[in-house]
Amino acid sequence: MSLCIDLIDDALPQTQCRQCGYDGCRAYAQAIVEGAPINRCAPGGREGIARLAELTDRPVLELDPDYGHEAPFAVARIDATRCIGCRLCAVACPVGSITGAPKRLFAVIEETCTGCALCVAPCPMDCVELVELERSWTREDARRAREAYLTTQRLRSAMLSKKDAEKEHDDATKKAVLDDVMARVRAMMHPR
Ligand code: SF4
Ligand code: SF4
Ligand code: SF4
């Protein structure tokens, strides 16, 4: 049976949490196509494993406990009384769900938070916690999360390219100024 990465990726929850040990859902989808076990996605849980088993024509397995445990859907919340506005949580968020301005209060946009928990560990003030919601993560949530993830990645790489271009321009300007100074010094030292 020939496996398609897109189909496997579609079956994954798109929280991009990396609990599976891969750099996001698509990377895990690719690994599955290349033979990795189908039972490493804790957010997908049993239902997700069953979907993967069907798509890959492999037997249903229990979730591998080395890769996490199935848990109710939860979103991140920031304790405003302790936040110092360092922005580390926002940098860690793969879907751009944390807003705020440097040195000011940061907050989670609950509607787009996937509950991936990647913002929890980087917080130096220990003020991000996951709060369970009384609902499950749906396939529609997953589709929206993937769009948000791709948009966030595109914006971040555009910003990096802009910074690189600005740095290149600054470096070229500094080099031109330095070359000019050196040429003048040489002309002073060795007048014709
Ligand atoms: S949601 Fe599942 S497949 Fe996606 S990164 Fe998390 S563990 Fe890996
Ligand atoms: S706010 Fe935190 S838990 Fe929510 S998506 Fe961003 S990194 Fe993940
Ligand atoms: S990492 Fe913690 S302290 Fe820093 S902005 Fe985020 S919530 Fe505030």
Image (spheres, rainbow, N blue to C red):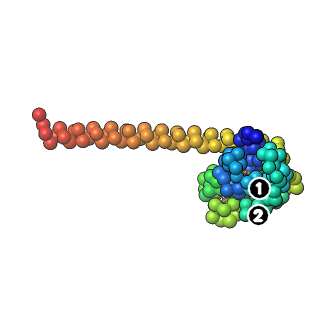
Q: Residue furthest top?
A: 192
Residue drawn at x 13%, y 39% is 190
Amino acid type shown at disc 1: Asn
Residue drawn at x 84%, y 50% is 50
Q: Quadrant of the N terminus?
A: top right
Q: Which residue is mark 1?
A: 39
Q: Would residue 75 be visible to someone looking at this image?
A: no
User: Callout 2: helix, strand or loop?
Assistant: helix
User: Callout 1: helix, strand or loop?
Assistant: loop
x and y percent of residue 133 in the render?
A: 84, 56
x and y percent of residue 20 in the render?
A: 71, 55
Q: Residue furthest front?
A: 1
Q: Nearer the viewer, residue 99 or 113?
A: 113
Q: Residue furthest left?
A: 192
x and y percent of residue 100 in the render?
A: 66, 51
Is 7 located above or below residue 94 in the figure?
Answer: above
Is 175 located above or below residue 133 in the figure?
Answer: above
Q: Which residue is mark 2?
A: 65
Of the image marks 1 and 2, the number of the one nearer the N terminus = 1
Disc 2 crowd rating (10 Å Cα; few below 14, some 14-19, many 20+) is few
Residue drawn at x 60%, y 43% is 156
Whether the residue carrying mark 1 lies under 8 Å from ligand 1 is answered with: no
Q: Would residue 167 be visible to someone looking at this image?
A: yes
Amino acid type shown at disc 2: Pro
Q: Nearer the viewer, residue 80 or 126?
A: 126
Count of marks, rendered view: 2
Q: Nearer the viewer, residue 18 or 172?
A: 18
Q: Quadrant of the C terminus?
A: top left
Whether the residue carrying mark 2 lies under 8 Å from ligand 1 is answered with: no
x and y percent of residue 64 in the render?
A: 76, 61
Q: Which mark is residue 7?
A: none
